[in-house]
Image (cartoon, helix red, strand yellow):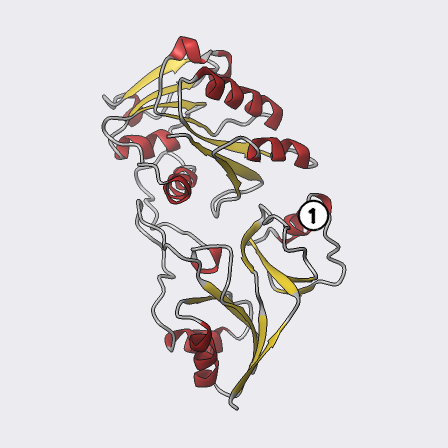
Amino acid sequence: MPFSYEAIDATAFLAFPEQSSMLQTELAERLQIDASAQTAYGDLLVVPFVPAECPLPFWCRTAMLEPNIIHFDSIGDAASALRAMQRSWAPYQYAHFRRAALIQQKLPHVQLKPRTFPCELPASPIGLYTLIDEHTMIASAKTSSVLPAGTLSWIEDHKNPPSRAYLKLQESLVLARHFFGVDLPHSKSRCLEAGACPGGWTHVLVQLGAKVHAVDRTELVPSLMQNPLVTFQTHDAFTLSPEELGMFDWVFSDVICYPGRLLEWIQRWLSSGNTKNMICTIKLQGTTDWQMIEKFAQIPQSRVVHLNYNKHELTFIHCGE
């Protein structure tokens, strides 16, 4: 037979680029998984005997949940082996790039290029494979992400946004719609952004037509300060109460602060009833307090994720509509 399958009792976690060490730390400290017997293929960590109830690590962009080792004779055989398992596949390439590209060409089309914001995400998870050598790959039809190799990238606007932070909000909003089915902010939406300077997130919101009340000690860039959709308040937003500020459809924060202070602020807003939707960046400093991160994740109708555009931080998404 030109190809063969060998199921393995393992889970393969694909780390975000340059985040393998954080993934390994999380596996050991948060999830108490002994990864001493793991095998690494670039950023892909194959860990044997992971309990079925194990939650997905935050620092994993996608996981192979039912991995197989596939032995094949030719490029065509490799593609046939994958198609026999399911339709949609994406590669993680860390070696044998040309050979992997030729295999991908023989598979049904999957969008691997940067996308235009806003976009709809696929409805079903996409299979993942990676070449171990020229005639062997590890592949799983069942994965944890609807994104190809867990990756979402945008066609960037290098001219108009005042900072690259806008990319994080674009990703967060698309994930909020995917996870919770909410509408993106629009012309009838009223939004609050805490710590808005220089205005990367506000830029995204006004592009969607939303009205934004931006709060910071420092003004936004002139183009946003002059935008009729933006009102600006000079203040520390975390010291203003929800009752002072009023009702908002969405509340946002990309403020640099300790996670404990952010959690307290989020809980104050949610308990006030003055908003139903929040997206906030959890800035991590020093040793990660996993118990604190779990408190964010345990808030009903919420998700904590590591974005493709996050660095040493996580993103809290809550949608209560």
Q: Position of residue 160 (x, y in %)?
A: 30, 38
Q: Quadrant of residue 173?
A: top left
**Relative height, residue 245 to residue 97 (above, below):** above
Q: On the rendered structure, is 314 left or right of 23?
A: left
Q: Position of residue 250 (x, y in %)?
A: 37, 26
SS class, disc 1 = helix
Residue at position x 51%, y 23% from top?
A: 266
**Relative height, residue 178 to residue 289 (above, below):** below
- Quadrant that contains the C terminus: top left
Q: Position of residue 38 (x, y in %)?
A: 71, 62
Residue holding disc 1: 25
Closest to the observer: 134 or 138? 138
Closest to the observer: 228 or 58? 58
Kindly give the residue lying farthest to the top in the view shown.
244
Residue 173 visible: yes
Residue at position x 49%, y 18% from top?
A: 271
Q: On the rendered structure, is 166 left or right of 12?
A: left
Q: On the rendered structure, is 109 left or right of 15?
A: left
Q: How many numbered discs sit on the rendered protein?
A: 1
**Relative height, residue 126 to residue 119 (above, below):** below
Amino acid type indicated by mark 1: Thr
Closest to the observer: 3 or 100? 3
Kindly give the residue lying farthest to the front in the view shown.
53
Residue at position x 35%, y 29% from top?
A: 202
Q: Quadrant of residue 104?
A: bottom left
Residue at position x 31%, y 36% from top?
A: 184
Tag 1: Cα neighbours inside 10 Å, few (<14), some, or many (≥20)? some
Residue 44 visible: no
Q: Position of residue 171 (x, y in %)?
A: 40, 43
